[in-house]
Amino acid sequence: MKPYITGIHHITAIAGDAQKNIDFYTGVLGLRLVKKTINFDAPDVYHFYFGDELGRPGTVFTTFPFQGARRGTKGTGELTYTSFSIGKDSLEFWIGRLKRHAVAVSDILTRFGEKLIRFEDHDGMGIELVSNNQDDRPGWTYGQIPAQHAIKGFYGATLNLRAKELTEQLLTRHMDYKFIGQEGDRYRFGTEGMPGDIVDILIDKSGNRGMQSAGTVHHIAFRTANTQSQLAIQEILMQNGYQVTEVKDRNYFKSIYFREPGGVLFEIATDEPGFAIDEEEAHLGELLKLPEWAEPSRKRIEAGLVPVTLNPGKYE
């Protein structure tokens, strides 16, 4: 039987200034803005989706930019570092590029035999770039980043937890994940153990709980093929005592949500239908797209949002 869960679908974070958010992820990191819409649960706030050319599942980092939000803090019960995948010969390029744009970068680190760097965006969001030769996804570039160095999509994510046993049971018994290995207090899981499906649990038994605000992750979404597989995994989770929401229509995918035992908000999102249902592929992310129920309030919504522009070329 095919697995219901096939890796990471998207990761969603809370941000502060909307324009700085677009500038960093499209300009500095070179991701494509594939959709500009609103937070369906808070329509006075943008929802930006950054990814590869089409916003394929496994490449999409999304943000809710709350203007003026204070900075959150990393801690237990949170996804503290989002890892992106780059080519095996791209680390030096990225170290130079980030320093050129005044982003403080760690020394080169090694984890499970692969080299990576770690840094934060302007809000304090934890980001890693993992150099590897396992990822054949082409990535995206607006032109300011050479194609061979473009970010390919997610590599994985780190969950900072006080204990792993119950979360490990969830991943391995009910979500098609397998244990891959251990380095110190870090435990690695994957569906296939490839870039785009890696989840690390980092144990911090005495750590303080994180405070969610700008610069912290709101939730991680896992991929499932369609509504049929989503309903199947929803039933499995409910039968095993997890408090799962009803299916929510997010226009570009359908979603269910629940909290894993360590406190991180999990989502299961469908691969279908994708981001091209309301914009041509060549023009993704150019207009403010609203769900049908919000269209009657478009003037009011637009008046309340801070205008933003897309200009990745200024970050050559």
Image: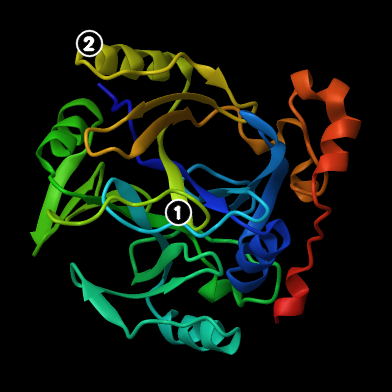
Label 2: few (<14), some or many (≥20) within 10 Å?
few
Of pointers 1 and 2, the one earlier in the residue sequence: 1
**Furthest-right residue in view?**
299
- In front: 67, or 229? 67
Which residue is the site of mark 2? 239
Q: Looking at the image, do the residues carrying marks 1 and 2 touch, with CB atoms under 8 Å apart? A: no
Residue 236 at x, y percent in the picture: 26, 15
Colour scheme shown: rainbow
Instruction: Count the labels in the image.
Output: 2
Q: Is residue 144 above or below residue 162?
A: below
State which quadrant residue 132 falls in: bottom left
Question: Label 1 is placed on what type of residue?
Answer: Thr
Residue at figure coordinates x 85%, y 39% from the top left: 302
Question: Label 2 is placed on what type of residue?
Answer: Gln
Quarter of the image containing the C terminus? Answer: bottom right
Residue at figure coordinates x 53%, y 74% from the top left: 148
Q: Is residue 110 above or below residue 136?
A: below
State which quadrant residue 192 falls in: top left
Residue 91 at x, y percent in the picture: 41, 81
User: Which mark is drawn over residue 216?
Assistant: 1
Q: What element does badge 1 sit on?
A: strand
- Asked if residue 236 shows in the view, the reply is yes
Quarter of the image containing the N terminus? Answer: top left
Q: Relative to residue 199, is residue 96 drawn left or right?
A: right
Mark 1 → mark 2, Cα distance in angstroms? 31 Å
Label 1: few (<14), some or many (≥20) within 10 Å?
many
Q: What element does badge 2 sit on?
A: helix
Q: Is residue 294 above or below residue 93?
A: above
